[in-house]
Amino acid sequence: MMYYIDEVNDMSFSEKITERRISLNMSQRELAEKLGITPTRLNYWEKGKREPDLHYIKALAREL
């Protein structure tokens, strides 16, 4: 999927995580396993209920 820069800038952090994970055809469970967290924790991040700390932001950047 292709986005224009304004569309990407308007997306929330949680939306960006979800969109990128889906574009890689990765389930929440698969990404959670790669990050060493529970799928529930990842779901909270993707729903915007919580935000990952810096350690996990770096891990997300590597995986996504």
Image (cartoon, rainbow, N blue to C red):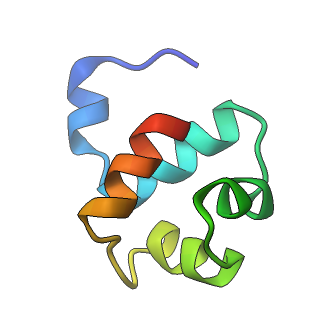
Q: Is residue 64 in view?
A: no
**In the rendered view, does 63 fall on the left or right side of 45?**
right
**In the rendered view, does 17 fall on the left or right side of 27?**
left
Q: Quadrant of the N terminus?
A: top right
Q: How many marks?
A: 0
**In front of the other: 10 or 29:** 29
Vertical relation: 62 (above or below) 54: above
- Counting from the top left corner in percent of width and height, residue 60 is at 45, 48
**In front of the other: 54 or 10:** 54
Vertical relation: 59 (above or below) 46: above
Q: Is residue 50 in view?
A: yes
- Counting from the top left corner in percent of width and height, residue 54 is at 24, 62
**In the rendered view, does 40 fall on the left or right side of 48?**
right
Vertical relation: 62 (above or below) 30: above
Residue 7, quarter of the rendered image? top left
User: Residue at left 67%, top 79%?
Assistant: 38
- Counting from the top left corner in percent of width and height, residue 22 is at 68, 42
User: Residue at left 46%, top 36%?
Assistant: 62
User: Residue at left 78%, top 64%?
Assistant: 29
User: Residue at left 43%, top 54%?
Assistant: 15
- Counting from the top left corner in percent of width and height, residue 26 is at 76, 44
